[in-house]
Amino acid sequence: MTENKLFCFVISVACYASAGKTGLSVFIPLQASKPDWLVWMVVFLGCLFVGIDWGLAFGIGLSILIQLGHITFPEIRVLGRIPATAIFRRVITAFTDAMSDKM
């Protein structure tokens, strides 16, 4: 059992080290989305310490909870039209050219 954990650790280090050379940003935590990275770490650590069945179950459960959070608390954005165009962009403080259409 100890050899399997050591093998998984060596493989994860090799994937992390080769991520920059291959252009895969999936293995670099700062370039992946935070919820995805959290699910990957829960699955990895769950499989490493508890077992494959429970690790995958934890990951699936966490994925479902994250999706329920997105459904329960949706992000509402106010769009504004750029003058003299048909392009709509999100109205934020850095985007001063947008005008929100009020009806």
Image: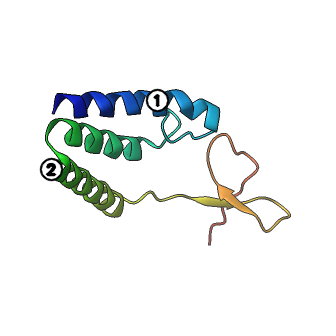
The quarter holding residue 40 reads: top left
Q: Residues within 10 Å of mark 2 (few under 14, many from 20)?
A: some
The residue that label 1 is drawn on is: 14
First along the sequence among labels 2 and 1: 1
Residue at point 81% right, 60% down?
A: 83
Q: Nearer the viewer, residue 26 or 10?
A: 10
Q: Is residue 31 left or right of residue 80?
A: left
Q: Horizontal and vertical percent for residue 47?
A: 22, 43
Q: Is residue 26 left or right of residue 22?
A: left
Cα distance, mark 2 to mark 1?
25 Å
Kind of residue indicated by mark 2: Trp
Residue at point 37% right, 27% down?
A: 10
Q: Horizontal and vertical percent for residue 97?
A: 76, 49
Q: Horizontal and vertical percent for residue 49?
A: 16, 35
CB contact under 8 Å: marks 2 and 1? no
Q: Which mark is residue 101?
A: none
- Tell me the element at label 2: helix
Q: Residues within 10 Å of mark 1 (few under 14, many from 20)?
A: few
**Above or below — where is 8 with respect to 64?**
above
**Above or below — where is 6 with respect to 43?**
above
Q: Is residue 27 left or right of residue 97?
A: left
The residue that label 2 is drawn on is: 54
How many labels were placed on the picture? 2
Say if residue 33 shows up in the picture. yes
Say if residue 29 shows up in the picture. no
- Tell me the element at label 1: helix
Q: Horizontal and vertical percent for residue 62?
A: 25, 52
Q: Nearer the viewer, residue 72 or 54?
A: 54
Residue at point 36% right, 58% down?
A: 70
Q: Quadrant of the N terminus?
A: top left
Q: Quadrant of the C terminus?
A: bottom right
